[in-house]
């Protein structure tokens, strides 16, 4: 274990077999002041399974370990005034340089970045070595971004207390497109098809029992007529899109 870097561990036990043709796992480095934030989520569900199967590896890097100050100080007041504190360049840059490789793509999770899309997630799934720098406080010294970051990404037009949650969103959105992670290779594409053309949401889904508290499964889904079922689902998806996302339909409120 390198100084300040801890391997994600404690994956829950799942009955999952590694791919027949084992390849080098996709490598993810998450740099944060609070690496423990990620230990639970990264070792559960799909992400945990993907690690156990050797499809991905996740290293959690504590930025504070790379501070050279006596008390491991990592932030200071911004020049020019303003509220809050800013992450200083030294520990961030030293942490990034300690773990990055020649082909590592470094991403900073920032509300000022380009908006995350399904297309971007699919693109990033093609990268073998990704590094996520999570922001804290009022942000990070611009010199970190200028010298070490390849791309800034925002998960939405809102502000979070830190970039930790954003890093988890980006991680899970990307690994869906890594072959073998979901099992069904068509899954990530069919689930996200509406995001590509903005034409419709996925239609409503039902399972057993057929009736629950007086509410029954629509008869069309029990008909066995797949063409009509698909048509019904598409109609329902378009109807919901118009109702909840009129902006994607060109409808002005």
Image: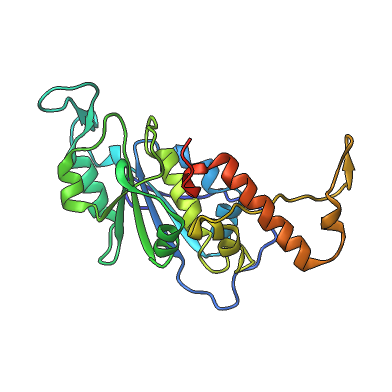
**Residue 112 drawn at (x, y percent):** 28, 41
- Residue at 38 percent across and 38 percent down: it is 157
Does 157 appear above or below 177? above
**Residue 202 drawn at (x, y percent):** 63, 54
Q: How many marks?
A: 0
- Residue at 23 percent across and 54 percent down: it is 97
Q: Nearer the viewer, residue 178 or 240?
A: 240
Q: Nearer the viewer, residue 90 or 187?
A: 187
Residue that sits furthest to the bottom in the current view: 21
100 sits to left or right of 180: left
227 sits to left or right of 211: left
Q: Nearer the viewer, residue 165 or 15?
A: 165
Colouring chosen for the image of the structure: rainbow
- Residue at 77 percent across and 63 percent down: it is 228
**Residue 184 drawn at (x, y percent):** 64, 67
Q: Is residue 159 visible?
A: yes
Does 217 appear above or below 230? above
153 sits to left or right of 87: right
52 sits to left or right of 33: right
Residue that sits furthest to the left in the current view: 80
Q: Is residue 12 visible?
A: no
Q: Which picture quadrant has residue 35?
A: top left
Q: Which picture quadrant has residue 33?
A: top left
Does 252 appear above or below 82? below
- Residue at 84 percent across and 48 percent down: it is 217
**Residue 115 drawn at (x, y percent):** 37, 48
């Amino acid at each position: 274990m390198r100084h300040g870097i801890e391997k994600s561990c404690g994956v829950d036990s799942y009955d999952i077999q590694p791919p027949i043709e084992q390849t080098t796992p996709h490598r993810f480095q998450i740099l944060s002041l609070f690496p423990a934030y990620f230990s639970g989520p990264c070792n559960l569900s799909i992400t945990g399974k993907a690690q156990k199967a050797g499809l991905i590896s996740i290293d959690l890097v504590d930025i504070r370990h790379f501070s050279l100050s006596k008390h491991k100080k990592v932030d200071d007041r911004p020049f020019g005034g303003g509220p809050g504190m800013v992450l200083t360049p030294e520990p961030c840059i030293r942490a990034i340089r300690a773990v990055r490789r020649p082909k590592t793509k470094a991403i900073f999770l920032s509300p000022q970045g380009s908006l995350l899309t399904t297309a971007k997630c699919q693109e990033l799934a093609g990268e073998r070595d990704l590094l996520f720098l999570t922001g804290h406080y009022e942000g990070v010294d611009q010199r970190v971004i200028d010298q070490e970051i390849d791309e800034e990404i925002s998960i939405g037009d809102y502000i979070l207390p830190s970039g930790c949650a954003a890093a988890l969103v980006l991680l899970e959105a990307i690994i869906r497109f890594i072959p073998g992670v979901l099992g069904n290779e068509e899954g990530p594409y069919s689930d996200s098809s509406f995001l590509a053309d903005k034409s419709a949401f996925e239609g409503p889904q039902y399972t057993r029992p057929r009736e629950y508290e007086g509410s029954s499964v629509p008869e069309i889904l029990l008909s066995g007529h797949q063409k009509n079922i698909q048509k019904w689902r598409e109609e329902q998806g378009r109807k919901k899109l118009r109702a909840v996302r009129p902006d994607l339909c060109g409808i002005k409120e």
